[in-house]
Image (cartoon, rainbow, N blue to C red):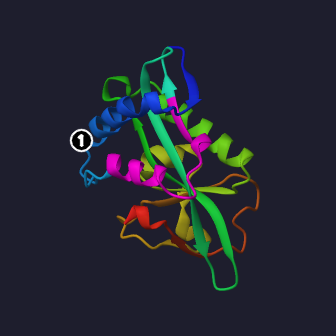
Amino acid sequence: MSLSFETIQPADYEQVDQIVKSAFAASEESDGDEVPLIHRLRATYDYQPSLEVVAKTDLTTVVGHGLLTPVTIRGSRHNTTIVALAPLAVAPDQQGQAIGSQLLSELETRARLAGFTAVSVVGDMNFYGGRGYVMAEDFSIHNSLPVPMGSNLIKPLTAGALANVGGMIEYPASFK
């Protein structure tokens, strides 16, 4: 299957809402807030359209979506801005075809090009672990949100990016 990865456009919003809603419908960890969260994040000062990406099979058919948002790691001596992935979704009938992995790779490349040094995600280690994500606690980075044990993950985008960073990940108010 041939895919294109594009910066989201307003014409894609409705399809994205449907994909995200259906992708998270069966998830036990979902609180059903994924679509409203996307809408709140788009309205923030820090929103960067180039960090919201859709995967398309043709000019108009969206099959995947991912959004990165700047967050701050507040340490005892300094603050570091990275990006958080929330959410990443693939249409249920398209899952299992590596679309999520390709979309994640595109988002990581865009984050690196935008100058961000790491990507944080609250997610499944079975999926993200095989893509270079590790426990954030390995870098003494903790999550300010109540997250399930073992799901606070992070991936440095450049060598040494998280050396001596440590601290608490603080999210924009939109996440709460």
Q: Magenta stretch?
A: 34-54
Type of amino acid under label 1: Ala
| Residue under the image location 46 percent in, 53 percent down | 41
Q: Position of residue 111 (x, y in %)?
A: 66, 47
What is the residue that sits farthest to the bottom in this orientation? Answer: 76
The C terminus is located in which quarter?
bottom left
Examine the structure image and report whether residue 50 is included in the region drawn in magenta. Answer: yes
Q: Which residue is mark 1?
A: 25
Examine the structure image and report whether residue 149 is included in the region drawn in magenta. Answer: no
138 left or right, relative to 160? left
Q: Position of residue 85 (x, y in %)?
A: 50, 51
Q: Position of residue 15 (x, y in %)?
A: 36, 29
| Residue under the image location 34 percent in, 37 percent down | 17
Q: Position of residue 12 (x, y in %)?
A: 44, 29
Could you say which quadrant of the image residue 154 lies in?
A: bottom right
Q: Nearer the viewer, residue 87 or 139?
A: 87
| Residue under the image location 63 percent in, 80 percent down | 75
